[in-house]
Image (cartoon, rainbow, N blue to C red):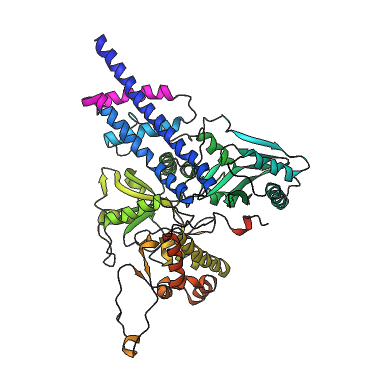
């Protein structure tokens, strides 16, 4: 009996070590890829930076699969023993106690146990479940940062700051950039009712994304502080300051859910999230983890936060989301919480020729693609369980009738086998009816800019109806319906052929050959469904969108290997020489 217990304890420790080592190896590889951001920035290698972000996304699943393979060798026929996994969980919990990023270790463990046992819902016996606490509650260690006392010479302080962040390339105009930064920060402080900057603190870690580097921190006055995010670019083998983001809205957009993830080699993640919350107190924890590249942790925190909301509002029911009924997806939401759940219907509308696996692949492509602030990030969830009484009768009837492949009832529980989850935004078609003329004009102009930004990132939206676009809390227009989305380089943009005679001119039928990938920008006004005055506003601001030549030019630049720049901030944040 003693020998059996000893062998069991030894196996438990070895299994625990496999999981711990697996996460540590994953974390090391994650850091290796993140550190490349500096080298990519210095080389002006936007494409390489993007490829590193995508490669880093695949690390997690690869690491989990590798650990499961090693556990299978170790545990053999006990791999699926719940009693064994209960002991592994206890030992693992002791080993990670006190670690700053313990929540990341827990999520890694949960991913392994859920895949092995195909868990639906949660299983506290073999998972870590903590719905009642925030993952950052136990973090007290301050994130590493540089602190600068500001005397009477703010330009000199900014020059000193830049000097402390060294690259293999020289700064092109470090003193002039210091002057520009000081001038802009003084202006921002005056607008905020502060007289002078007393100190500045910046994270030691530099953040990289889409060819830029960011120094992230805060500037303090007597009674308040403002964000201080310095955007750097590489031009002509020199580093230059491009912009200063000192407004919370600007920083919120930069760290938003419509952009790709940062390359940032953070010694610990949780303490960085705590610091970023001081800049963005309204930003959900899950989005901060995700934008730092910790997508799995972000997914875990999103689930926890949503379940907390459900438990806190037992009287509230989930309903069909606002907007036109989707021909491919059924979409529902909890009105008090800014998420939508998108479920594939069993049968699509007849006009939709796309297949289920093609829709799923498009959503996966968006997750991997450079989103440049115009595509909602999407998270894929499997085997979610919700209380039946928290669905409206109408919604539940629709899901059971039209999504039977992935929705079923299990006693008093609704089980959803597969869904995509996104942040909820206001559908543009509804928004345009609800706001005043000025806001509607601004939204339509930004819709045009969104189409241009997407094009420059090699994306063509496909379906241009306003119902497929949304407006975020920050007022930005984004695209969220991906079933007709395609790569720009896969499209054939054509001018409309000229009719040879009256029969062709007035024919109700298309008298010329059209391939599936042919796109005629001159015809876009017919598919935009905008009121004449709004369509005219769009034409005035972005008339080139209706010219096949513009699209062909963008396409040609992308095909030549050029990586087109889409800044994550507007011109008012940029510093001009």
Q: Is residue 392 visible?
A: no
From this view, report whether residue 326 is shown above or below residue 173. Answer: below
Q: Position of residue 501 (x, y in %)?
A: 34, 89
Extent of the magenta region: 73-98
Furthest toward the bottom, the residue is 502
User: Predominant secondary structure in magenta?
Assistant: helix
Side (left or right) of 297 relative to 436: left
Q: Residue at x 63, y 58 (%)?
A: 572
Residue 499, located in which quarter of the rendered image? bottom left
Query: Looking at the image, which is closer to me, 424 or 336?
Result: 424
Q: Is residue 85 magenta?
A: yes
Q: Residue at x 47, y 74 (%)?
A: 531
- Identify the image quadrant of the N terminus: top left
Side (left or right) of 207 relative to 506: right
Query: Looking at the image, which is closer to me, 41 or 341?
Result: 41
Q: Position of residue 446 (x, y in %)?
A: 52, 64
Furthest toward the top, the residue is 2
- Identify the image quadrant of the C terminus: bottom right
The number of discs equals 0
Q: Position of residue 192 (x, y in %)?
A: 70, 50
Residue 527, located in which quarter of the rendered image? bottom left
Side (left or right) of 303 relative to 165: left
Query: Looking at the image, which is closer to me, 570 or 429?
Result: 570
Q: Residue at x 30, y 68 (%)?
A: 516
């Amino acid at each position: 009996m003693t020998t059996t217990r000893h062998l069991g304890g030894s196996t438990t420790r070895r299994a625990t070590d496999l999981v711990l080592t697996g996460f540590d190896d994953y974390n090391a590889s994650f850091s290796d890829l993140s550190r490349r951001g500096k080298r990519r920035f210095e080389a002006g290698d936007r494409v390489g930076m993007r490829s590193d972000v995508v490669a880093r996304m695949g690390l997690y699943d690869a690491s989990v699969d590798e650990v499961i393979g090693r556990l299978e060798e170790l545990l053999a026929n006990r791999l699926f023993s719940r009693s064994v996994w209960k002991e592994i969980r206890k030992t693992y919990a002791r080993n990670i106690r006190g670690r700053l990023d313990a929540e990341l270790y827990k999520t890694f463990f949960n991913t392994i146990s859920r895949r092995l046992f195909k868990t639906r819902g949660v299983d506290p016996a073999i998972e870590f479940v903590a719905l009642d606490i925030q993952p950052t509650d136990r973090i007290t260690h301050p994130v590493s940062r540089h602190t600068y006392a500001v005397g009477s010479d703010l330009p000199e302080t900014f020059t000193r700051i830049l000097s402390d962040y060294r690259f293999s390339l020289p700064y092109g105009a470090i003193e002039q950039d210091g002057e520009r930064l000081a001038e802009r920060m003084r202006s921002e402080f005056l607008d905020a009712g502060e007289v002078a900057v007393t100190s500045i603190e910046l994270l030691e870690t530099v953040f990289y994304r889409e060819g830029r580097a960011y120094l992230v921190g805060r500037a303090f006055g007597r009674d308040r502080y403002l964000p201080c995010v310095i955007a750097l670019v590489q031009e002509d083998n020199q580093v230059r300051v491009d912009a200063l983001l000192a407004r919370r809205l600007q920083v919120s957009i930069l760290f938003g859910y419509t952009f790709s993830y940062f390359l940032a080699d953070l010694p610990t993640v949780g303490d960085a999230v705590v610091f970023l919350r001081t800049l963005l107190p309204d930003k959900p924890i899950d989005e901060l983890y995700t934008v730092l590249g910790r997508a799995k942790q972000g997914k875990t925190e999103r689930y926890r936060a949503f379940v907390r909301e459900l438990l806190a509002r037992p009287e509230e029911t989930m309903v069909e989301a606002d907007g036109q009924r989707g021909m491919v997806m059924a979409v529902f939401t909890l009105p008090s919480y800014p998420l939508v759940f998108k479920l594939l219907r069993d049968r699509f509308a007849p006009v939709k020729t796309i297949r289920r696996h093609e829709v799923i692949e498009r959503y996966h492509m968006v997750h991997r693609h450079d989103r440049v602030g115009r595509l909602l990030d999407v998270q894929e969830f499997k085997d979610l369980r919700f209380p039946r009484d928290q669905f409206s009768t109408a919604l539940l009837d629709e899901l059971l009738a039209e999504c039977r492949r992935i929705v079923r009832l299990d006693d008093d529980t609704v089980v959803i086998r597969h869904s995509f989850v996104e942040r909820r935004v206001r559908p543009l078609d509804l928004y345009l009816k609800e706001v005043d003329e000025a806001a509607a004009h601004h939204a339509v102009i930004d819709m045009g800019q969104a189409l241009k930004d997407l094009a420059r990132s090699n994306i063509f939206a496909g379906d241009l109806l306003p119902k497929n676009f949304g407006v975020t809390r920050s007022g930005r227009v984004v695209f969220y319906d991906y079933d007709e989305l395609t790569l720009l380089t896969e499209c054939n943009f054509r001018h409309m052929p000229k009719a040879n005679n009256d029969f062709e001119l007035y024919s109700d039928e298309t008298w010329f050959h059209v391939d599936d990938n042919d796109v005629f920008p001159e015809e876009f006004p017919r598919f935009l469904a905008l009121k004449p005055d709004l369509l005219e506003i769009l034409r005035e601001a972005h008339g080139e969108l209706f010219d096949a030549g513009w699209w062909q030019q963008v396409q040609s630049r992308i095909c030549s290997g050029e990586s087109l720049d889409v800044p994550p901030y507007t011109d008012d944040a940029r510093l001009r020489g």
